[in-house]
Image (tube, grey):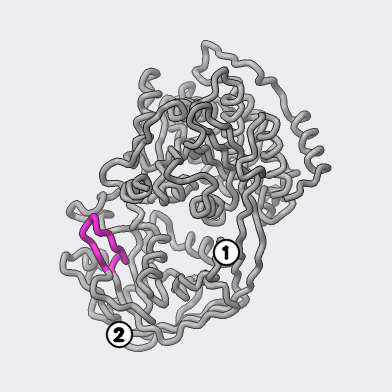
């Protein structure tokens, strides 16, 4: 892609104007364990990436052009090689599918329901067609919609779903189960809504509707109303997504209860679906859903650069962070309409740029190659990382690990750290070994049932077998204690997350960000000089994928 040199010149000038401090030498003080030069570099990059001139960094806008121009210019300035066959860019073709009219749904048979969109149901399609009609499709309750051989679980056993629409439960059988199933309250990928859609398509279903329940979903129906309606971006496919179900959607819990009652199921639906002798149940009703679509095609870009290894250049450690945010939207109370995304995720991109600088300034280059990958469209469904995972520039079985940085806290240093999905792979042990000498704690997910491991870009590397780590500062502020850190985290989530107020401030404390980035640098350095490959722990759903990949 050709970059507008005037834009690049303007950004370079902006960088010079905003940079408030030099980070050419490492400064350590008695008051901090963080690398203050790293903290200064991170702050410098956030100020630029979260500036209004980048228009909220939305894919397919002039904000994208400016953002990827800045990132690639920084890679080039550091002396990193273009990562994609001579280019700093990887094209990511996408389609936007939006409603041309409001979807309609009618259920007939034992249960009669004229469904109200966003009240009783939401429905959409990935099929790249101007109209999709599901007509009188028999409804079947398929439990959790899970096929998991390692847990001896198959909700589709003996079931022919061709032409039918399956109704399935959110999360997996282990959540709040009276006996130990799957991983208990810790969600496996089998519990994610994305998996439910994928498995229904593999089984040949015409449609799939997930029953929303607040506790196992970990969010209320309003999230379904906001996030699963309107236009959505998808990666384009050669078959125009005709391999997916015609309709993918959700049912409200009340609507689902009426449907199940029509088939004589009046007990708790999760208890019923957990029975050892569970078999899919015809619901004695059919559904018709009509969708009218507007299609728009365009191309976004991942930005990629490589530091070639000195001895084993054909083995790779990846650093990832998503560069995108929401662009311009509804103004807030102050009239601000630009979603700058300073924390989410200018902080992550700033961190991998700062880490890249440390690698290039080190006296000795690592033995393995280090790849820096800033991905697009995370906010649209992890699309940039999904595209890389399915179109890898470097072989996946030669990719040692993915180290992902997404939304670092801005309240200073902490004495604890959080690993998303702790217990999945050997990278946990690297974090623990580095934090132990300082007496720092390492925690897992606060709400393991919410499936956080499947909600950022690292997941798309895990999905193709690459061990992936997503690391964050914890909540225990070294200066002000845990209550302060928890209050700061709550304030961000309640008042700034995905809001125009997530913006840069000169008072932003990036020392905690430098702590996390410093740990990620040390992990990458260690991995970069080893000859072994970290693996998945026994019980991880990604272990078999990696084992198969490494056998080739």
Residue shown at 42%/75% (left/top)?
Answer: 207
Kind of element beneath mark 2: strand
Q: Which segment did they paint magenta?
A: 143-155
* Disc 2 packing (10 Å; few <14; some 14–19; many ≥20): some
Mark carried by residue 284: 2
Using residue 438 as the reference point, say whether residue 29 is left or right of it: right
What residue is shown at x 37% (from left), y 66% (from top)? Answer: 199
Question: Which quadrant of the structure image shows residue 60?
Answer: bottom right
User: Going by the image, does 96 lie left or right of 165?
Assistant: right
Res 448 seen here? no
Residue extending furthest toward the bottom: 109
User: Is residue 82 in view?
Assistant: yes
Q: Residue furthest right?
A: 6
Toward the top, the furthest residue is 30
CA separation in Å, label 1 and label 2: 36 Å
Residue 506 magenta: no
Using the image as rendered, state which of residue 172 and residue 159 is in the foreground.
159
Can you say whether 523 is above or below 230 in the image? above
- Tag 1–tag 2 contact (CB < 8 Å): no
Within the magenta stretch, is there residue 149? yes
Say which residue label 1 marks.
236
Q: Please state if 454 lies on the left or on the right of 148 as rendered.
A: right
Mark with earlier residue (1, 2) = 1
Q: Relative to 524, does residue 211 appear above or below in the rendering?
A: below
């Amino acid at each position: 892609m050709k970059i507008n040199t005037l834009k690049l010149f303007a950004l370079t000038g902006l960088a010079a104007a905003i940079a408030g401090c030099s980070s050419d030498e490492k400064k350590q003080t008695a008051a901090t364990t963080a690398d203050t030069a790293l903290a200064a570099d991170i702050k410098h990059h956030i100020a630029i990436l979260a500036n209004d001139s980048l228009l909220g960094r939305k894919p397919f806008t002039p904000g994208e052009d400016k953002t990827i121009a800045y990132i690639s210019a920084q890679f080039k300035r550091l002396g990193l090689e273009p990562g994609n066959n001579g280019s700093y860019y990887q094209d990511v073709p996408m389609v936007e599918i939006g409603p041309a009219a409001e979807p309609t749904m009618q259920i007939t048979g034992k249960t009669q329901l004229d469904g109200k969109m966003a009240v009783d149901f939401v429905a959409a399609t990935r099929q790249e067609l101007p109209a999709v009609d599901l007509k009188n499709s028999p409804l079947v309750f398929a439990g959790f919609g899970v096929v998991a051989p390692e847990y001896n679980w198959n909700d589709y056993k003996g079931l022919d779903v061709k032409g039918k629409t399956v109704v399935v439960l959110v999360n997996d059988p282990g959540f709040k189960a009276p006996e130990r199933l799957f991983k208990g309250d810790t969600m496996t990928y089998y519990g994610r809504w994305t998996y439910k859609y994928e498995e229904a398509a593999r089984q040949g279903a015409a449609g799939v509707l997930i029953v929303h329940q607040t506790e196992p979903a970990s969010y209320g129906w309003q999230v379904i109303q906001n996030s699963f309606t309107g236009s959505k971006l998808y990666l384009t496919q050669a078959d125009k997504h005709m391999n997916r179900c015609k309709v993918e959607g959700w049912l409200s819990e009340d609507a689902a209860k009426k449907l199940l009652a029509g088939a004589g199921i009046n007990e708790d639906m999760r208890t019923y679906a957990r029975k050892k002798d569970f078999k899919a149940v015809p619901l004695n009703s059919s559904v018709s859903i009509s969708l009218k679509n507007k299609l728009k095609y365009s191309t976004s870009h991942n930005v990629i650069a490589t530091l070639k290894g000195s001895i084993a250049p054909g083995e790779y450690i990846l650093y990832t962070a998503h560069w995108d945010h929401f662009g311009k939207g509804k103004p807030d109370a102050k009239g601000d309409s630009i979603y700058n995304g300073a924390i989410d995720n200018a902080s992550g991109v700033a961190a991998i740029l700062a880490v890249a600088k440390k690698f290039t300034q080190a006296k000795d280059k690592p033995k393995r190659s280090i790849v820096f990958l800033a991905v697009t469209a995370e906010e649209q469904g992890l699309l940039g990382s999904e595209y890389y995972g399915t179109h890898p520039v470097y072989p996946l079985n030669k990719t040692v690990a993915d180290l992902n940085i997404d939304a670092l806290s801005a309240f200073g240093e902490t004495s604890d750290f959080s690993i998303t999905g702790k217990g999945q792979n050997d990278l946990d042990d690297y974090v623990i070994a580095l934090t132990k000498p300082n007496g720092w704690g390492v925690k897992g997910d606060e709400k393991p049932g919410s499936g956080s491991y499947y909600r950022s870009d690292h997941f798309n590397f895990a999905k193709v077998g690459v061990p992936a780590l997503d690391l964050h500062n914890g909540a225990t502020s070294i200066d002000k204690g845990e209550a302060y850190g928890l209050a700061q985290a709550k304030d961000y989530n309640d008042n700034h997350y995905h809001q125009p107020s997530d913006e840069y401030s000169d008072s932003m404390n990036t020392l905690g960000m430098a702590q996390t980035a410093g740990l990620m640098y040390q992990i990458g350095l260690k991995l970069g000089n080893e000859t072994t490959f970290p693996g998945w722990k026994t019980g991880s759903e990604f272990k078999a994928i990696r084992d198969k990949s490494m056998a080739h």
